[in-house]
Image (cartoon, coloured by chain):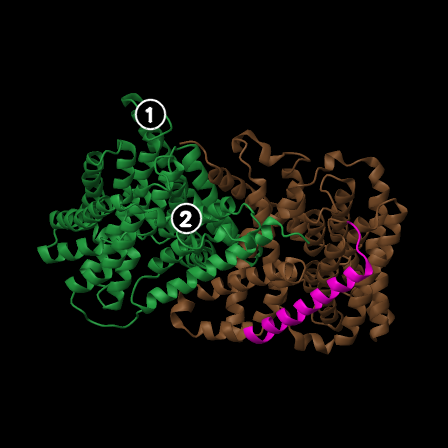
Chain colours: A green, B brown
Amino acid sequence: MEANSAVALFLALGIIILASRIAGALARRVGQPRVLGELIAGVLLGPTLLNLLDLPVFHGAALQGTIDDLAEMGVLLLMFIVGLEVDLSELAKVGKVAIFAGVVGALAPVALALPMMLAFGYTWQPALFVGVTLAATSVSISAQVLLEIGVLRTKEGNALLATALIDDILAILLVSLAVAITGPRGEVNAGELVGIFVRMGVYLIAAGMLAWFVLPRVMNWLADRPSLEQSYGVTAFALVAMFLFAWSAEFFGGLAAITGAFLAGVGLSQTRARLRHQIGDAVSFIAYGFLVPVFFIDVGLKIDLSAFPASALSLSLVLFAIAIVSKVGGCGLGARLGGFNNQESLRLGVCMISRGEVGLIIASLGVTAGVLTPDQPLFSSLFLVILASTLVTPVLVRRVFPHRSEAGANA
Amino acid sequence: MEANSAVALFLALGIIILASRIAGALARRVGQPRVLGELIAGVLLGPTLLNLLDLPVFHGAALQGTIDDLAEMGVLLLMFIVGLEVDLSELAKVGKVAIFAGVVGALAPVALALPMMLAFGYTWQPALFVGVTLAATSVSISAQVLLEIGVLRTKEGNALLATALIDDILAILLVSLAVAITGPRGEVNAGELVGIFVRMGVYLIAAGMLAWFVLPRVMNWLADRPSLEQSYGVTAFALVAMFLFAWSAEFFGGLAAITGAFLAGVGLSQTRARLRHQIGDAVSFIAYGFLVPVFFIDVGLKIDLSAFPASALSLSLVLFAIAIVSKVGGCGLGARLGGFNNQESLRLGVCMISRGEVGLIIASLGVTAGVLTPDQPLFSSLFLVILASTLVTPVLVRRVFPHRSEAGANA
């Protein structure tokens, strides 16, 4: 029997998921976040070293397209789960600090990166995308460190979770805006910009109301049919909601598909607690056991660090400096304005340094929109900055917080 | 933002999963098995009626390839779960009847269909595939009916589960053989046939030992690392085992990939009970909530019943007669030889009539191997026979069994 493309895909997926898990476990061993190991594994499997998908064993099967599709589904699931975990009542308690820190902390990277990129000779479209990419904090890494040193359930810990959520929402909206105004024609006039905003606004209101008021009721009703629950109907309908909202965000709203997935998650977070956990469990199995590892490895599969020119090193260092200053300064300033004292503001700002999956998602949306190119030094620089920010965060967070306990060290 | 292919895929998947769930629920409403509704939904979405993937909303995106890949992963998961549910000790209790009924019942369709197809003017390759397609019983439909009328935990019920399992294993081996000897060159000589058997045998022994002795120990060991279990490592490694065994079955053994997935499932059924349930739950979410609906709909997406010629009706009726006679007669005879009395043998034979997912899997492997073509009347005939066998089974089963209860009617 000749190897067909599906069988080659099975081998590729087996290797990709295995490599991702092993690398994640190794990273945890040396006290680093799992995602760091997974990203490095992706780079090693990619053209930088192994060039996995071009190995003779794959018989030249065209796998990249399907793997990209699986990775994009992984991204949707990630954002859907973020939405599912939103707890607006908890958020309201630290609302003022979180809003100030989130807004200033999301705008500062754009405000710093945009002029700097222009100074480096880039046009405004990639400059804007770089800013937005650096706007999105990855809360999981800091949250894990705070958990390890026993200070997650503190004022700063709660503020971190709330700020990161606002930060995520703003980053998603900013990238939708960036995608819309950096369209294929390159330039938009003021009238078109207003049109884009109106379209986004109308979609967000309509889809938001649908997600908030209709979706949880439909799901609660469905879950009451016993035959449905037993046969994975709840999982299936959660995926249906995620896929259709994701599609509609782009088709009707001109937004990024992840915005729709996020909205579907927020809507379904309003279902009964037991049902919400059931959805979360099911979707997490699909996400973390299957598709998210594919996403993290897929990022590395597209990057060729062996082709990274020494001349791009200065750009990387500048972007790295912006990544740190914009969050420590931006979130710190915002937190101070929101009522935190100097020490608390500094701690919150440091916790917000690490970038991760959302930054990578935004960078790959830049690729889809034709603004960034994976084999450009700029894309590699962004990738390195995200890696580096993930590397320094645990060290810096441990430095600014008092240690209370070393228990619960699993991610 | 221009619609990219991933966003079109999101819409297609949303529609496919939704249609599959609604059709399955409607089928249950009218007392039919869920899979029947899902297959009919696939036909309605396909070229027979709607021609979903050619609708203008998909902007001509080439989705069929990715959807086929997802469907094939769904097939792997189905066979993996069958393997995971194997309980060899339970099986041994009804072993003699099951082995006789399983073997005679799996060979009878081949023995009847092969000469009949040759008489219809087909070559031996499609004739063999039709026989093997009709060899595979879908136990879930009969099991569900027995559950509904309260006789699943009887002598015949246990024998049904065991016989269907043996039937599945034989069908998988038969299709591997059929794929191997109906290769692109069309004919094989005796020496090559021996080579094929030796290669299959060596692979099955080696992979079987690996699956049986090594895989459960590796998984037990992995599950003891606390950081792994918390972060979906068990799910990920189960998928890795499934994908790599599936690939190796074809690459090393010349067998169908589903054989490898099945072996991986049998191996992991030997893990600790809690772990086995954990794997089963996780994989079932991915299978039944996501990829299996894609498979059932995908079968229909490939069939154009509107092009089904009236001249093929006689073939369909003959195949349907063979489907019924070969199971009632074949399994019944086997059961009688194995020690059942006449009534028990008839009941077991009737329970084995319904074909379903495994038959469809085998038919699609015939397509992959280039022996069957989806737009041929023969493929449509096979599909109709599988549908019809699924339709008549609940009626006939209820007729030959005494009714004890109508409780537990959910599938």
> Which residue bears the numbered disc 1?
A195
Give the magenta part as a residue range: B186-214
Q: Secondary structure at mark 2?
A: helix
Q: Secondary structure at mark 1?
A: helix
Q: Which of the pair A296/A401 is nearer the observer?
A: A296
Quadrant hosting residue B328: bottom right
Q: Is residue A398 visible?
A: yes
- The location of residue A191, given as percent across then percent down, is 30, 21
> Which residue bears the numbered disc 2?
A75
Cα gap from disc 1 to disc 2, whole angstroms: 28 Å
Chain under numbered label 2: A
- The location of residue B156, given as percent across then percent down, is 76, 70
For the N terminus of chain A, the image quarter is bottom right
Magenta segment, prevailing SS (helix, strand or loop): helix
- The location of residue A113, given as percent across then percent down, is 21, 40
**In this figure, what is the number of numbered marks?**
2
Q: Is residue B192 magenta?
A: yes
Residue located 72% across and 78% down the image: B93
Mark 1 or mark 2: which is in front?
2
Whether residue A232 is situated above or below residue B341 in the rendered picture: above
Whether residue B360 is situated above or below residue B352 in the rendered picture: above
- The location of residue A22, given as percent across then percent down, is 42, 65
